[in-house]
């Protein structure tokens, strides 16, 4: 499965109301169907997120400007009755933001206006995708909130360590250098330190003292 491609844009063309690009990636030319709306964003070097369909007698690539568009296209294909050409017809007419806004505001007319999407299929799209989008948005908000809380806690912890080092009368420039080294160390090994339960004042304070003594 090929997820994305970056390469030189060789050519673009329209055929039977389908928009294609040819991208040279390491000497191989990939013919990719993409959206009319993407044409204005194409550059000499282009990156596209791909959906790759492989059948016994053919292979097809569908290209999108980012992962969110590609993933939504995949969700569309899971709706009964929707094939890749209907999915591309939707992206040829509307941006992902417009489609999601229509789903969230129950604007069925927008989806229904796409060639090949009748009323029954529109209702099926709303039934199957609206709750999925809400679920994804909810998870994203919870993840962002959780990350923000953890980052705030880590910032407070580092401030407490700096205050503790200041109380030991080390030179201020050495303390600041130590704090900078500690933050770099945390950025590089944050996952390992979390798994070992070492994101705490005692461990990080001892680590800071080691930095000071060794420098």
Image (cartoon, rainbow, N blue to C red):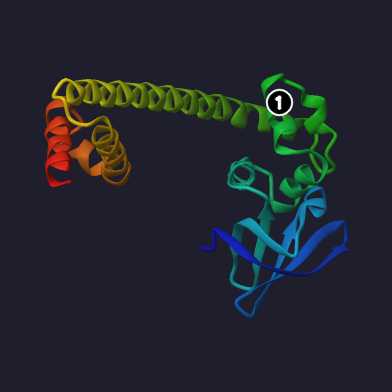
Q: Quadrant of residue 34?
A: bottom right
- Residue at 13% in and 24% down: 168
| Residue 36 pos. (x, y %) | 82, 51
Q: Residues within 10 Å of mark 1 (few under 14, many from 20)?
A: few
Is residue 127 toward the left or the right of residue 92 in the image? left
Q: Quadrant of residue 63?
A: bottom right
Which residue is nearer to you in this view: 93 or 193? 193
In the image: residue 69, left or right of residue 153:
right
Q: How many marks?
A: 1
Seen from the viewer's position, the closer of residues 107 and 12 is: 12
Residue 54 x %, y %: 58, 66
For residue 137, above or below residue 42: above
For the point 73% across and 26% down, which residue is it? 102
Q: Secondary structure at mark 1?
A: helix
- The answer to which quarter of the image holds residue 42 is bottom right
Q: Is residue 143 visible?
A: yes
Q: Would residue 197 be seen by someone viewing this image from the given angle? A: no
**Along the viewing direction, whichever of 98 and 86 lies nearer the viewer:** 98
Residue found at the very far bottom of the displayed protein: 27
Residue at x 21% of width, y 23% of height:
166
Q: Residue at x 30, y 46 (%)?
A: 188
User: Is residue 194 positioned above or below 127 on the image?
Assistant: below
Comparing 185 with 142, the one in front is: 185
Q: Residue 67 in the image: state x and y as whole percent.
A: 58, 47
Residue 202: x %, y % from top left: 12, 27
Q: Which residue is mark 1?
A: 101
């Amino acid at each position: 499965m090929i997820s994305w491609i970056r390469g030189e844009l060789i050519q673009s063309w329209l055929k039977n109301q389908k928009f294609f690009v040819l991208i040279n990636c390491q000497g191989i030319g990939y013919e990719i169907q993409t959206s009319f709306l993407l044409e204005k964003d194409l550059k000499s070097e282009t990156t596209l997120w791909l959906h790759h369909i492989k059948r016994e007698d053919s292979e097809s690539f569908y290209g999108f400007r980012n992962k969110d568009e590609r993933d939504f296209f995949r969700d569309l294909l899971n709706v009964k009755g929707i094939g890749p050409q209907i999915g591309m017809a939707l992206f040829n007419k509307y941006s992902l933001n417009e489609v999601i806004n229509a789903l969230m505001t129950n604007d069925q007319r927008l989806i229904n206006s796409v060639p090949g999407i009748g009323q029954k299929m529109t209702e099926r799209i709303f039934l199957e995708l609206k709750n999925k989008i809400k679920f994804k948005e909810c998870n994203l908000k919870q993840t962002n909130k959780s990350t923000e809380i953890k980052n705030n806690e880590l910032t407070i912890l580092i401030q407490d360590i700096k205050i503790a080092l200041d109380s030991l009368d080390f030179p201020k420039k050495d303390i600041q250098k130590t704090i900078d080294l500690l933050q770099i160390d945390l950025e590089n090994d944050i996952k390992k330190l979390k798994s070992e339960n070492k994101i705490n004042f005692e461990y990080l304070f001892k680590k800071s003292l080691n930095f000071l003594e060794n420098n």
